[in-house]
Amino acid sequence: MRATVEAGEKRPTSNAQLLSWVDEMGKMCKPDRIYWCDGSAEEKKRLTEEAVASKTLIALDHEKLPGCYYHHSNPSDVARVEHITFICTPTKEEAGPTNNWMEPKEAYQKLAGIYDGAMKGRTMYVVPYVMGPSRSPFSKVGIELTDSVYVALNMGIMTRMGKVALDRLGPESKEFNKGLHAVADCNPDRRFICHFPQDNTIWSVGSGYGGNALLGKKCLALRIASYLARNEGWLAEHMLILEAESPTGESQYVAAAFPSACGKTNFAMMIPPGEFKGWKIRTVGDDIAWMRVGEDGRLWAVNPEFGYFGVAPGTNRKTNPNAMESIKKDTLYTNVARTKDGDVWWEGIDSEAPAELIDWKGQVWKKGSTEKAAHPNSRFTAPMQNNPALSPFADDPKGVPISAIVFGGRRSTTVPLVLQSFNWTHGVYLGATMGSETTAAATGAVGVVRRDPMAMLPFCGYDMGTYLGHWLSMQGRIPNPPKIFLVNWFRKSQDGKWLWPGYGDNMRVLKWMLDRCAGRAGALETPLGFTPREGDLELRGLKDADIAAATKIDLKEWEAELESQSEWFQKLGKTLPGALEHQRQLLLLQVKATLAASK
Ligand code: OXD
Ligand code: MN
């Protein structure tokens, strides 16, 4: 059957490229109906009602949570699936040793077999969207075709969606990302997330989960955008962007990369402790930064997203009051637990679990059960306008000028609370060797250390060594570069206690970094970089911290760390820039010499 638009409905664009591509995809997927999203409030209401009628969404209590709905995903479909995420470049070398690769023709054929007729009996939603402020020359248009109303509604929160994107695209432009998504039968054996950077195309099938299915986010704004950024001379990064305004009214902006589920949203929405009276932290973005060199020679960042797709467990009034405020209305909850009277609950929320809940699988859950009531990777999707600490520049077409770039991992040993790089190359090296203990945001073992350069391991759309070379080459393009830091909020004592309280107290580290950027704070020069001496950090009122242990650099541990990085660099292969291996050797020689001198 040839897919048709709903009777009487006019296609809202005359863009011939777009129309013929939608027709072609429609012929393959064979939906009963093709629906073009316009992004209006009336449409949101209608699609939500349809989703409730088909039991895709469950309405929550609209007294407590106005405009909020709940979604259970298929229990086999709860996280990103890195092992079946592919970069489909003409050669395997272009995808590099850290990505899965599939030859483009083979990938198109294989997935076409799964898409064939996969939308029979369903609607294909055409979701036009803009990543980035709609008036910004740096923004990109994408079109996602999807058989999931849940995805269409999420895209309406996470992106500037609908007419705004078609208006921006206009009648002639061929410059749009072609995203095809079908949950199809949600069969893990027929699940693939394929990226075709040369074709500006994404084909995702078999999963309805956020990172696999909301194609504007990880697929376009990171994997495809990182490829475009290299060609066009900018950076597409897995980074939050925050604004810090001091009591004297001076604003500085920071971009920070942390692996998934390591507290990016919390850092971006941080509330400083009482000792920091007059300081205001505001959010520009919580997950992705697109950064370009401005006319003034500084690096300017925009957040391409329009909402937050955050991890629910652990979010509460203490860890992230601004997130709790952001998710009170117009939010979609996925795989958290809910109460019979339409409220939500998760492990680590403020209140104790009630006696009984409905768990993330839809089963009755009793207090005391050893099973988690909410899935560890359960999420909220909330509009960024809900954030009481939203920066007035979050929608600025030019973005914000970055003073500091921060890399951070989740390391229980070795990596100190904060380290400032000696220079740009050393900073890129700190990002390239960043490691983290894995979390529940992706399928696979939790708690294993893996190297995750710039937190981009799962998100780089091309060869990692070439990506690191691109980072090094940016130095020549940025006359006024940001300073680069490495942080670790997760170091533990030998008996397993956190050495640093984290959350709002991270303001103390942030302030030191901002002062370093402004040339105002002292530091100790160590063989590995600059660290704060105890007096350099604002510690008034700090509880439950062991500063000496948190900031300590143990050269013996670092000797082992630097040696183990050699294996990682070998894995990256011959495209790894020589400067980074030289940097490793230089640091190792310095560490060994210092150890020898102290014997
Ligand atoms: C995310 C992730 O959802 O990094 O942001 O997994
Ligand atoms: Mn992320």
Image (tube, rainbow, N blue to C red):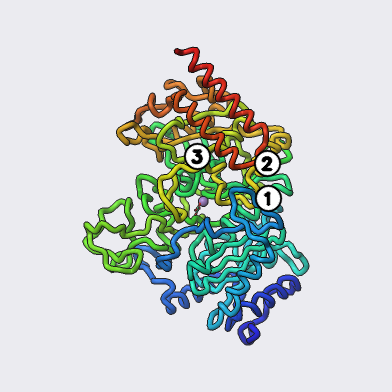
Q: Do the residues bearing badges 2 and 1 touch, measured as CB atoms within 8 Å?
A: yes
Q: Is residue 417 left or right of residue 424?
A: left
**Judging from the image, what secondary structure is the residue with disc 2 in?**
helix
Mark 3 or mark 1: whose residue is earlier in sequence: 1
Per the image, label 3 sits on a secondary structure element best described as strand
Instruction: Kindly tell me whether residue 548 is visible in this rendering.
Output: yes
- Residue occupied by mark 1: 93
Q: Nearer the viewer, mark 3 or mark 2?
A: 2
Local packing at callout 2 (Cα closer than 10 Å; few below 14, some 14-19, many 20+) is: some
Mark 2 to mark 1 CA distance (whole Å)? 9 Å
In the drawing, does residue 16 fall left or right of residue 195? right
Residue 365 point in image, percent of width and height: 26, 64
Dot 1, how many residues are within 10 Å of its Cα: few (below 14), some (14-19), or many (20+)?
Answer: few
Residue under label 2, please give it: 575
Query: In front of the other: label 3 or label 1?
Result: 1
Q: For this rendering, which residue is in front, 60 or 255?
A: 255
The amino acid type found where label 2 is placed reads Thr
Q: Nearer the viewer, residue 460 or 397?
A: 460
The secondary structure type at the circle numbered 1 is: helix
Residue 277 percent across, percent down from the top left? 42, 34
Q: Is residue 319 left or right of residue 485?
A: left
Residue bearing the label numbered 3: 435
Mark 3–mark 1 distance (CA, rounded to whole Å) = 24 Å
Q: Note whether 582 is above or below 262 in the view shown.
A: above
User: Please, what is the three-letter code of the amino acid marked with disc 3?
Assistant: Gly
Disc on the earlier residue, 3 or 2:
3
Q: Give the residue displayed 56% in from the left and 77% down from the top.
A: 118
